[in-house]
Image (cartoon, helix red, strand yellow):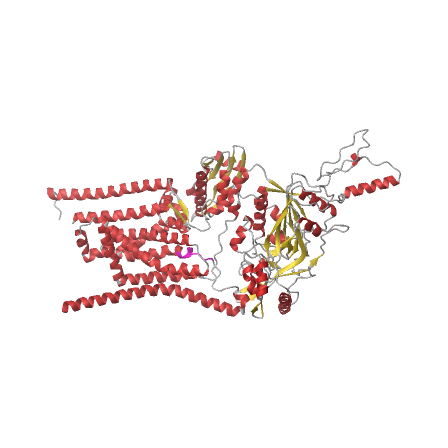
Amino acid sequence: MTSPNPSPAIRSSLAAQRGAVAALALHVVLLVLVLGQIVYLGSRFHRRFDLTADRLSTVSGSTRTIVDKLDKRLVVEAYFSPKDKLPVNLRQTREVLDNFLDELVQIGKGKVVVQRFDPNEDKAISDRCTRIGVQPLDLRSQSSTSLSVDRHWQGLRFVYGGQKQKVVPQVAPGHWFLAEVQLTPAIKEVATEQKRKLGFMEWPATAVGQQSPGGIGWNMLRTHEQIQKRFEFQNFKDEDGALLPDDLDTLFLFRPKDLTDRQKYVLDQFLLRGGTLVVFADAAEYAIGPNRLFTKLPLALDAAGSERRFTDQLAAYGVDWKPKVLADMATQAHTPRDRLSQPFEYLAVPQMTPFGQQMSSVFYPYFFHAVAADWAGSAEQLATRDGKVDKAIAEAYRREFKAGMPTDDFLLKVFKQIGRGPGFYWPTWVGLRERAPGVPDLPAGVSGRVVLWSSPAVLAEDPPQSLDPLGRGDARARVASLQKFQQRLMERFQSEPRQQAPLMVDVRGTFPSFFAGAPRPKRPSEIKEEAGRAEAKAAGEEEPDAAETPPDAMGPPPPKAKEAGDEAAPPAAEAEPLQQALRPGRIVMIGDSDFVRDDLVRGDHRQGGGPWSSLGPVFFAQLLDWLAEDQDLLELQSRVPVDRKLKFVDGDPVAAGDPRLAEQALRAKTTWLRTLNVVVPIGLLALFGLAVLLVRRAQKRSFLTSLAG
Amino acid sequence: MRESLVIFRRELKSYFYSPIAYVFGVLFLGVLLYHSVELLTNGVQANMQGFFLMLPYVLLFFLPVLTMRLWAEERKLGTIELLMTFPVRVSQLVAGKFLAALVFLAFLLLLTLGLPLTMHAFGGIDWPPVLGMYLASLLFAGSFVAVGMFFSSLTRDQIVASLSSIVTLFVLHRIGEPATIELANAWMPAMLVDLLSGISPHRYFLSIARGVLDTRDLLYFACFCGFFLYCNALVLQHRRQKG
């Protein structure tokens, strides 16, 4: 029992205890304060190190370059709801966004200012958001007693130099590099004075069994939001063959066909004035209808009545287009990137498996890609016949064969990372004009290079009437048809010499005119006019006044009306034909147009088993920057994580032999590796423990023995 | 410093001489690796994130078992009085024990290197983030050890120490998880939720685990460990003064 009046000693002891507890509490409080201060200071002055090889959590060189180029102040107005009111998923994206904006301010060195506004707090701010185009995100919030809709804001407005602006209505990046991919182009767009103008002429593919009466073009990529932000495409396909305007520096030809001499002349003059001609070419047009019978549709490169062939014209510039269809027999070249989850990148058929109906890719080497491999290294393997290496042939192959992607241009950077190029569909041969195999024969002042090569196992043929591997009929008939198709190709592969086909070529220089010394082809309207004149003359009438010439919408200004009394002057016409190049021009020719066509890019045929141009859009986007030599966004577009897929078996396990055996072998190896990874560390630890135990026991025994002794 | 090293060596030896540590190690590795080998699947990306995302949960239930004995056992066996008579400061005792536990854990984590090595052999792994994740795991484990040691110093009953650690660590871990934050938002003031989630090691661990080493995250772990170790030292100092 405690005495009501404790002795002074006890009182002093209790006071000491209370003092000690108070001191402890004070210590802890002070500690929390000090640590809080440290954490606060640490968060103000911090550094971060991105350890990933792909630097996916670091501002790329692209963003740095774009921010460095800002010569006016960029104000980033962030219309953000308070972080603590956001749902969790959005909160995480806010963290990413905040980090990115902080980094932007840091690298901006005063040129980038971030202003934050809370639209939830002030009605005037939310009204402003609505006015400028920042969109709210209405999310349902549910608790045990209520259901409500919460309005969240997470949008940005970039204001450059106080005038130009760009609004990002909503932004919720899940990862740092996604924030960068979304926001850096927006910064570039607001800081760039104007869009780049690009011209095009298209000859859409015939739509079979589909609702596209105008044919299948390449609108999808041209009108893609990200592309439209930076480039302005304009159709210059003029039935009257007007010359192209001087301010146009790049012209795309999508699947040229039925070209008149006048159109060829227009292209010739464009090149001679220093233009860049980009051609997506096809030797043939195959229908991809609902049944995917791959039947050839009529296609003529030159229009009826054309006296000059388009292939000759290209050859005059140094480009060799052999209008043949290619098939690449190398397995790496025609295997889809992800044959398990996306077999429809090339050609797949539905197949019954123990897990239900699944798509399974089938052998179809007419759809393939360039492989990032040095094919000279495979010379011996390719020169092996009946188990013996023909050394002379191997040596020749070693000299002859090139790498699939022989350049280090940024166009191919991302593709080299994944080890392959974009998929091409019934591609054709486009290379350099050669005087002998491997010896280019380019016009004076012109240089060129092949940018993409097939593997050395390519077969070239004149476009056959059908390239359907499966045919119609029941499953058995289709398998038989496929085997026959495969056998036919294998026989050709065995009998034909090995060759590599160029798939893309880049030629530049001062091109000679294909029409040098020849009269310029007349425009249809001129021909019509002349015919009219001839008729009138024949009828004894006067010639029509030049002022009545129909106005030309696309070409140069129409001839001016003649002054009175100036009857002797010749009728004003378009510019005199150039015989020599004024400036260096450029031709980039790709031996395929299908990889950019709408239905393949959109993936219309995926359900049926393909094809689907999964990498076509990436290649096209890269191509635009490559042509523009705009390296600002280079790193941004190349930010694709390196493919590090686990491969427990070499090559293609299914193609190698019996799929069931391959599957079994794979399963066995997987189990073995997994077991090893569990058992070995545990076993090592247990063995180590056992060893320690034994040593200790021995030490103990010897100690006891020494004591006994 | 030398004194801390002496304590550290003594403690480390005790781990390796104790069969309990091996049982702990075998179970820890067994559970962790058994659930992580799914990452070794043909055709999937060589990535250790699955392993590191599971690690906190395994540590959550295993570490308190390791740390419960650190002080509680000394008290139970009466060796703490002996320890307190050593000519060393309490902070040095705490540091020695903490470092020994951390090194033992590092040893166990080292034994899991087979997994990334296998991935490297069959797919090529991005090593710097993996090493960063190992560092994050060690820091994370360190913060758990600090909490466990603190609770071990409060009681002589190892079960109580272990359970208190598990509950505290579980709460600390959960409050940093998105689902918990979402739930807490419904009935807690937002500022408090933000503060609590800011304390949780989980979010800082995730930050390092995604491959970015931020000085803020490192500072957080240093402060978190420092706080609990300091509290631990205060408790022991208080006890030493009480005699």
Tell me if residue A137 can be seen. no
For this view, does B207 lie left or right of residue A699? right
Q: Is residue A560 above or below residue A393?
A: above
Which residue is pictured at 20% across the width and 47% down the height? Answer: B238
The C terminus of chain A lies in quadrant: bottom left
Q: Where is residue B44? Give x, y as percent.
A: 47, 59
Q: Where is residue A422? Give x, y as percent.
A: 58, 54
For this view, does A702 lie left or right of residue A605? left
Disc count in the image? 0
Q: Is residue A388 above or below residue A253?
A: below
Which residue is pictured at 24% across the width and 59% down the height? Answer: B14
From the viewer's side, name the closer residue of A17 and A561: A561
From the viewer's side, name the closer residue of A569 and B228: A569
Instruction: Residue B46: say if magenta.
Output: yes
Q: Where is residue A89? Give x, y as percent.
A: 45, 48
Tell me if residue A589 can be seen. yes
| Magenta segment | B45-51
Instruction: Residue A479: say if magenta.
Output: no
For this view, does B139 lie left or right of residue A466? left
Q: Is residue A340 above or below residue A413?
A: below
Q: Where is residue A317? Give x, y as percent.
A: 67, 48
Quadrant in the picture for residue A37: top left
Residue farthest to the front, as pictured: A392
